[in-house]
Image (spheres, helix red, strand yellow):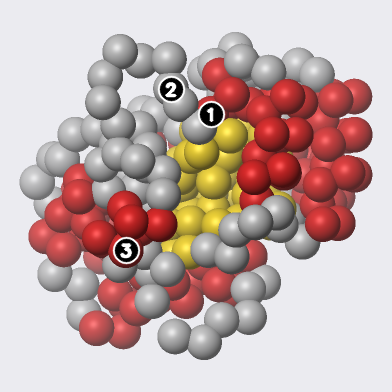
Amino acid sequence: MIIDVHAHWGPWFFTMDVAAANLSAMDRYGIDLAIVSATEAVIYDARAGNRALAGWLTGQDRHLGYVTVNPRRPADAERDLREYLPTGKFVGVKIHTDYTGSPASSPQTREALAMVAEAGVPALVHTWGATVLDLAEVCRDTPGLRVIAGHMGADGYAYAIQAARECDRLYLEPCYSHAPAGRVARVAAAVDRTRLLFGTDSTLIDPASAFGAVAAANLDEETAELVAWRNAARLFGLDLTP
């Protein structure tokens, strides 16, 4: 079984071809379940994108959703969390710190993540470079908060190792538009394996990139299973049978 914790639904504004967000693509890579955020919500209008995703998820049994939160619009975020989390089709929150101009250390994002903690769901937060350390600090300061460091800092994966050691409620997922040799293996050898997840960044990046990076790490069988789905199922409270 494989759970993709970092995926998207809807078209991108980039002038490039992307992998199709459909069951055939998931079947090609053996992905059983994908947790998606609406592209529209991430890059343009959180409320409109969340609303569109909610409608689409109604007919899906292999996708779950993230409620995308713009930290600069807390009233909208509060309404969307109250409306969509109880449906059972949304299991977490997505915050893109760059697109919203709201760094993890900003007062706005701190307040948004406090709201997430109160809602009792995990948050997938964009991290790049040393920003993963800022996310760890916010997580430590916010009781009950659980966060996934999207891209595990990208080229700053050494910071991700430090962040995971400093905060036991911070999880790492590896998707990245580059593939530095040994990146996943070094992280997996240095942090608690129960806090490693699998994510692809589909449909922005073809899932082959993440699969190749994880395969190159040569994880032992038990760790590979934890990364593939068990850790995610536990984090999101999913009752799944492989």
Number of other residues with Cα within 10 Å of mark 1, as a class: few under 14, some 14 to 19, many 20 or more: many
Distance from the alpha carbon under mark 3 to that under mark 2: 22 Å
- Give the number of the disc on residue 39: 1
The three-letter code of the residue at mark 3 reads Asp
First in sequence: mark 1 vs mark 2: 2
The three-letter code of the residue at mark 1 reads Thr
Number of other residues with Cα within 10 Å of mark 3, as a class: few under 14, some 14 to 19, many 20 or more: few
Instruction: State whether residue 242 is above or below residue 190.
Output: below
In the rendered image, which residue does mark 3 sit on?
Answer: 27
Q: Secondary structure at mark 1?
A: helix
Q: Quadrant of residue 113?
A: top right
First in sequence: mark 3 vs mark 2: 2
Q: Residue at x 77, y 44 (%)?
A: 116
Relative to 183, 148 lies left or right = right
Instruction: State whether residue 154 is above or below residue 231.
Output: above
Q: Nearer the viewer, mark 1 or mark 3?
A: 3
First in sequence: mark 1 vs mark 3: 3
Quarter of the image that includes the N terminus:
bottom left
- Give the number of the disc on residue 2: none
In the rendered image, which residue does mark 2 sit on?
Answer: 12
Q: Residue at x 48, y 64 (%)?
A: 33
Q: Residue at x 25, y 60 (%)?
A: 28
Relative to 30, 119 lies left or right = right
